Image: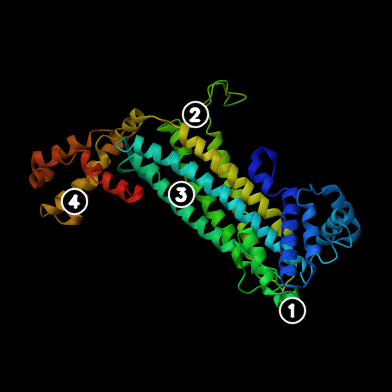
Amino acid sequence: MIPRYARPDMVAVWSPETKFKIWYEIEAHACDAQAKLGVIPQENADAVWKAKDVEFDVARIDEIEAVTKHDVIAFLTHLAEHVGSEEARFVHQGMTSSDVLDTCLNVQLVRAADILLADLDKVLAALKKRAFEHKDTLRVGRSHGIHAEPTTMGLTFARFYAEMDRNKARLQQAREEIATGAISGAVGTFANIDPAVEEHVCEQLGLTPEPISTQVIPRDRHAMFFAVLGVIASSIENIAVEIRHMQRTEVLEGAEFFSMGQKGSSAMPHKKNPVLTENLTGLARLVRMTVIPAMENVALWHERDISHSSVERGIGPDATVTLDFALNRLAGVVDKMLIFPENMLDNMNKFPGLVMSQRVLLALTQAGVSREDAYAMVQRNALKVWEERVDFQEQLLADADVVAALGVDGINEKFDMGYHTKHVDTIFARVFKN
């Protein structure tokens, strides 16, 4: 996580100040529940709330940890400095460090998920706007990078919208999966703390009690969460790569917005480079880099070890902060992207009429020609278009075998572009549910 690719709201989720505030709330709510059960005096629970407006001193906690070599104990020591050692003596009663650490981490991941869901809404809104704006803007579809058949720019945006809409559903599920807490004590048996404490703390923090924890919350939940972030990152790259291809000089069907005063190259003043989408490709790699470590965190020794801890201290902020930045950058790129319909038609006509080859092939088979013969008839004319840049329609009209099978009018009828866009409305209705 570096400032260049970080936005303040997501950074705040992972700040030490936020972490210690969540730790405090976990401990304070647990004291309330313990007092209600009669395990600790009510006045001691009330005393803990004297620190509710305190800004915990991160440097002081670090100073204590340098001696204790234990972050939770350092925090509890600092908390006692605020509420009094006698008043704080029942704090953390029956709990273990992971109760605080794991519950806090999941609170942070839930908050991060809420920010990312809002980010996805921005991306979806931009994609939907551009999809309807260019619903009928013709462009050539490509497979293997080679001209295939006509499609529309609107369909390109629509398929990206559908992909991101699936990602939103995945993230909503991942948020639900990670929104659990555990206040179950050493090895998760509740031997020294009543399950009612866990229920109360989770309710106050917007979590669900973990059905069964060991001394940690099961890490398959976290693996699923980070895997979803990795899929979202891959979808970002999918869109970014398409835009990068469109901006290539010999294609130039679309391009990133180039602002006043922007420079494309230190050496070549004419350059307009797709730097934002290239950056998105790189950021996607960083997010995906966190997926495998999250998967490897699932297998812990017996009821717990801490091999996952150092990993999560890195991948939690790194993945969410980077993805938050990338989603917002993508929304801006799509919203301000330049589209060049004339270039799309010019590109489609570089090999005049060639994109209609399949329709002619099908028509020949419908007219009684075997598929093998029909393919040979179409291909011999298509190859001339490739090699000589002649007009495909004219070549077919000059081919006696094709004319004999389809007739002149039958050939001409096969070059209507509307044939390829007749179901665009149907596809849009499926994608946008309108």
Distance between the Cα atoms at labels 1 and 2?
A: 62 Å
Distance between the Cα atoms at labels 3 and 2?
A: 22 Å
Q: Nearer the viewer, mark 1 or mark 4?
A: 1
Q: Which of marks 3 and 4 is in front?
A: 3
Name the N-terminal-most of marks 1 and 2. Answer: 1
Name the N-terminal-most of marks 1 and 3. Answer: 3
Please state which amino acid type lies under the numbered disc 1.
Ala
Q: In the structure shown, which secondary structural element does the residue marked by tag 2 occupy?
A: loop
Which residue has dot 3 on it? 164
Give how far across and how far down residue 99 sits, in percent: 72, 66
In this rendering, would 327 be left or right of 23? left
In this rendering, would 77 be left or right of 9? right
Which residue has dot 4 on it? 362
Residue 104 versus residue 163 in the image, above or below: below
Residue 355 in view here = yes
Which residue has dot 2 on it? 257
Please state which amino acid type lies under the numbered disc 2.
Phe
Q: In the structure shown, which secondary structural element does the residue marked by tag 4 occupy?
A: helix
Distance between the Cα atoms at labels 4 and 2?
A: 42 Å
Give how far across and how far down residue 181 sits, in percent: 65, 65
Give how far across and how far down residue 184 sits, in percent: 70, 72
Residue 191 numbered mark, or none: 1
Nearest the camera: 132 or 350?
A: 132
